[in-house]
Image (cartoon, rainbow, N blue to C red):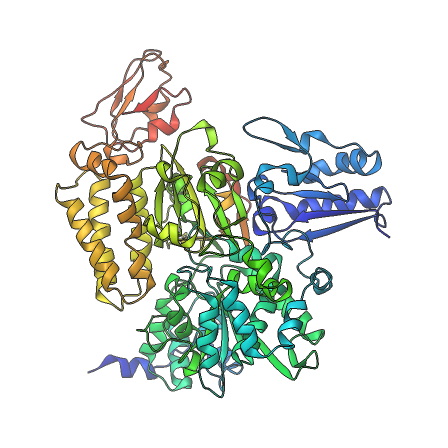
């Protein structure tokens, strides 16, 4: 019998911060102290708090250590495990209050969350099916198999579950369409082509709790009358693919995938398809084309995939997070699920909180929580004491929400009203040093690059909008550019074939709506208020700080900097090409921009 | 004369067609196999050699243009030989906001190649990708299967020297 259990986070974030080295060092130390029989070490899925990785939690006392290294292990074993003293220097310190917190539930990053979908992530060993089953796993499937398919569809409809991948379409309705479609063969497709830059909740879910997704897929299969599923995963997620393969093999061994599952007469087969790197494949019809081995280009709907999908058969496509909600609804019931969330948006949503906040990572919150709570409580506010400017929500399809809307409750409908959208749940916080025009340019360069080229509005429109934005950020903007942008944006939004084009203008439209003054400053004053657009900056040397060390003169490619040794230097604005090399080089902060 | 017919039937003398043939065995009677076939070929050769694509077209009885169409659509596929180590620098939103641009400049300076380029010694190929999905550690890159986070321009040299 083990006395203690130690969880080491082995999500992608913590692995790159050195989680495997920590595990190895810990195993060594335990062996040295003859404690292997007393302490069980588990590599778990993602805990979400990637910023502070690698993370290590000691149970049963629930002591949360962060930013641990292999070298810390001798001390941790001796002090904590042998002598029973907590190693204080490895505990979490609140960045604002400087308070030291030992219990992970008391850390604001966690205490404001409601982890339902992520309940197992970071708690169980994702490569061990028993741990999933002990925590109620596959009970939802059992319940679904005992029911008539129409009852299962009805339950999901009543739960109000909406698709977590983008547009928020009611999942129950999708299931009902596929259920009512006639066909000798039907498919369930799990969309794990998480292509939004800034979102990684599907990756963490697959890596941390793959069985939950498999169980959701099979419940969907039972509901619509399908016997085969495809999971379409990005090839960029090798760990997720590996853990899914392990999970499928284990479920097959336990008779949870295969023939006559749990003696119900229900058969199921699950295949994995690796995506090959095309953002547009997140769009459902493009995804189907990709599975069929074609170029991943969307086609007009109708017919919807529920009628004519994969290889012409009725197909139900849901995103990873949507499917991971399903086993919970089947196990705990509709009433339990609808008790969380708002009128139009039930349950929780996982956000990937990144950018300029103190605590980056993955958090799951009830729908209806305010942006302020997410950014300032869970995220711990803006790093370096800088001023909040906006959050970008929903990736390249979403929009920027300014400070005035910080108290907006987050749900599908309120975000759409604000001009943004839930999207997949990427939340990137920005401070005063982020230029909003440059951000719009960044997103457009992404969507323009990923536009598949099939329909004209998206192919040409994104290109033209990008050209205008590039012009503005280079200080060559024209007075009519803002109205040109607005006109093209509306046209592309209204007339593109698929979701990629229809939402591509959102970053422009929201920044124009909330940060129009920044566009105007670039165009009329040739000035970038955030100080980010290189071509618009002029550099100067503060004579009070400069000590004449000459370092900057050596890196200046155009010899624009002059001055005697040990005397303050000067930049010749005529010659300066604003490359920023001197600013990077100066150790004293004497080079400044205006 | 139309060149494509000739190209489709031309045979490269030193090319290992038998390797492609053996890879094809797993897929010949199945549907939707184009992407997995190309993935398998790339896994074997490190890129997609033109003779291999022509051979696939012939064996599957489809036009070469269709195979090229799929091969050039997806970012994952490469028609040129690549370096021993693949560097994938993330240009996602979180990395953008946290200043990946400077890291990218420095990287290109170190390697002396542009995006998509391979160093003359074939040691590194430098690519930029939309998002690696490790945004909590921005800016981040992958070299082969290893992820490196919280990058700064000055850290690059030390990381590259590990390879």
Residue at point 23%, 33% (across, down): A536
Instruction: Residue at 85% x, 41% y: name it.
Output: A33
A542, above or below A53, in the image? above
Q: Splitting the image into 4 quarters, where does residue A252 fall?
A: bottom right
Left or right of A501? Residue A254 is: right
Left or right: A580, with A138 as reference point = left
User: Visible in this render: residue A550?
Assistant: yes
User: In this view of the protein, which residue sits in the foreground, B159 or A298?
Assistant: A298
Q: Specify the quadrant that holds the C terminus of chain A.
A: top left
Query: What is the tally of numbered marks visible in this picture?
Result: 0
Position of residue A99 in the picture relative to residue A280 (left or right): right
Residue A364 placed where, x, y %? 54, 49
Q: In this view of the protein, which residue sits in the foreground, A346 or A495?
A: A346
Q: Is residue B15 visible?
A: no
Residue A413 at x, y percent in the picture: 39, 54
| Residue A29 appears left or right of A123 | right
Query: Residue A201 in the image: x percent, y percent?
Result: 52, 54
Does A509 sit above or below residue A264? Answer: above
Q: Residue A147: percent from the left, percent from the top?
A: 62, 77
> Viewer-proximal residue, A276 or B5?
A276
Residue A145 drawn above or below residue A184 = above
User: Which image quadrant for residue A104?
Assistant: top right
């Amino acid at each position: 019998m083990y006395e203690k259990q130690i969880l080491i986070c082995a999500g992608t974030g913590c692995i790159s911060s050195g989680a495997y080295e920590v595990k190895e060092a810990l195993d060594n130390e335990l062996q040295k102290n003859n404690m292997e029989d007393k302490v069980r070490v588990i590599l778990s899925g993602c805990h979400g708090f990637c910023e502070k990785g690698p993370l290590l939690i000691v149970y049963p006392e629930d002591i949360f250590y962060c930013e641990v290294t292999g070298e810390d292990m001798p001390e941790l074993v001796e002090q904590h495990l042998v002598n029973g003293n907590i190693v204080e220097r490895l505990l979490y310190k609140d960045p604002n209050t400087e308070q030291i917190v030992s219990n992970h539930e008391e850390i604001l990053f966690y205490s404001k969350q409601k982890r339902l979908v992520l309940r197992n992530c970071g708690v169980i060993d994702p490569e061990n099916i028993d741990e999933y089953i002990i925590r109620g796993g596959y009970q939802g499937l059992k319940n679904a198999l005992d029911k008539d398919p129409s009852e299962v569809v009805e339950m999901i409809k009543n739960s109000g579950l909406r698709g977590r991948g983008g547009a928020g379409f009611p999942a129950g309705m999708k299931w009902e369409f596929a259920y009512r479609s006639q066909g000798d063969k039907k498919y369930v497709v799990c969309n794990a082509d998480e292509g939004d830059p800034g979102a990684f909740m599907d990756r963490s879910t697959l890596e941390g709790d793959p069985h939950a997704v498999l169980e959701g897929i099979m419940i969907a299969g039972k509901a619509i009358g399908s016997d085969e599923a495809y999971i379409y995963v990005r090839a960029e997620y090798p760990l997720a693919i590996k853990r899914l393969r392990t999970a499928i093999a284990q479920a097959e061994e336990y008779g949870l995938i295969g023939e006559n599952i749990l003696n119900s007469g229900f058969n199921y087969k699950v295949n994995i398809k690796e995506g090959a790197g095309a953002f547009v494949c997140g769009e459902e019809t493009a995804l189907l084309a990709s599975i069929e081995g074609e170029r991943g280009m969307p086609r007009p709907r109708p017919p919807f995939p529920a009628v004519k999908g994969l290889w012409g058969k009725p197909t139900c496509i849901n995103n990873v997070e949507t499917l991971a909600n399903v086993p919970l609804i089947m196990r705990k019931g509709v009433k339990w699920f609808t008790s969380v969330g708002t009128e139009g948006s039930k349950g929780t949503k996982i956000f990937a909180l990144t950018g300029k906040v103190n605590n980056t990572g993955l958090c799951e919150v009830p729908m209806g929580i305010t942006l302020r709570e997410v950014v300032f409580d869970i995220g711990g506010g803006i790093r370096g004491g800088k001023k909040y400017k906006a959050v970008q929500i929903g990736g390249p399809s979403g929009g920027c929400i300014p400070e005035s809307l910080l108290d907006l409750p987050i749900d599908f409908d309120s975000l759409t009203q604000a001009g943004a959208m839930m999207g997949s749940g990427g939340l990137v916080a920005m401070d005063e040093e982020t230029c909003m025009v440059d951000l719009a340019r960044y997103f457009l360069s992404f969507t323009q690059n990923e536009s598949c080229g099939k329909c004209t509005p998206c192919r040409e429109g994104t290109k033209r909008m990008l050209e205008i934005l590039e012009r503005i950020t280079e200080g060559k903007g024209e007075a009519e550019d803002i109205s040109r942008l607005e006109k093209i944006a509306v046209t592309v939004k209204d007339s593109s074939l698929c979701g990629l084009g229809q939402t591509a203008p959102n970053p422009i439209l929201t920044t124009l709506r909330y940060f129009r003054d920044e566009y105007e400053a670039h165009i009329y004053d040739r000035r970038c208020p955030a100080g980010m657009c290189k071509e618009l900056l002029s550099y100067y040397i503060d004579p009070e700080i400069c000590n004449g060390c000459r370092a900057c003169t050596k890196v200046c490619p155009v010899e624009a900097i002059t001055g005697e040794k040990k005397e303050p230097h000067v930049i010749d604005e005529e010659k300066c090409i604003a490359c920023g090399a001197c600013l990077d080089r100066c150790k004293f902060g004497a080079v400044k921009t205006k | 004369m139309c060149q494509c017919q000739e190209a489709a039937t031309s045979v490269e003398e030193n090319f290992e067609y038998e390797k492609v043939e053996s890879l094809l065995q797993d897929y010949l009677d199945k549907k939707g196999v184009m992407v997995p076939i190309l993935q398998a070929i790339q896994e074997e050769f490190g890129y997609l050699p033109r003779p291999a694509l022509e051979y696939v077209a012939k064996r599957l009885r489809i036009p070469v243009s269709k195979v090229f169409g799929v091969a050039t659509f997806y970012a994952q596929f490469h028609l040129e030989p690549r370096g021993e180590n693949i560097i994938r620098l993330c240009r996602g939103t979180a990395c953008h906001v946290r200043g990946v641009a400077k890291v990218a400049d420095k990287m290109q300076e170190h390697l002396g190649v542009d995006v998509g380029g391979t160093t003359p010694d074939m040691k590194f190929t430098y690519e930029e990708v939309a998002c690696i999905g490790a945004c909590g550690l921005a800016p981040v890159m992958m070299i082969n299967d290893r992820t490196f986070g919280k990058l700064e321009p000055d850290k690059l040299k030390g990381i590259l020297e590990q390879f």
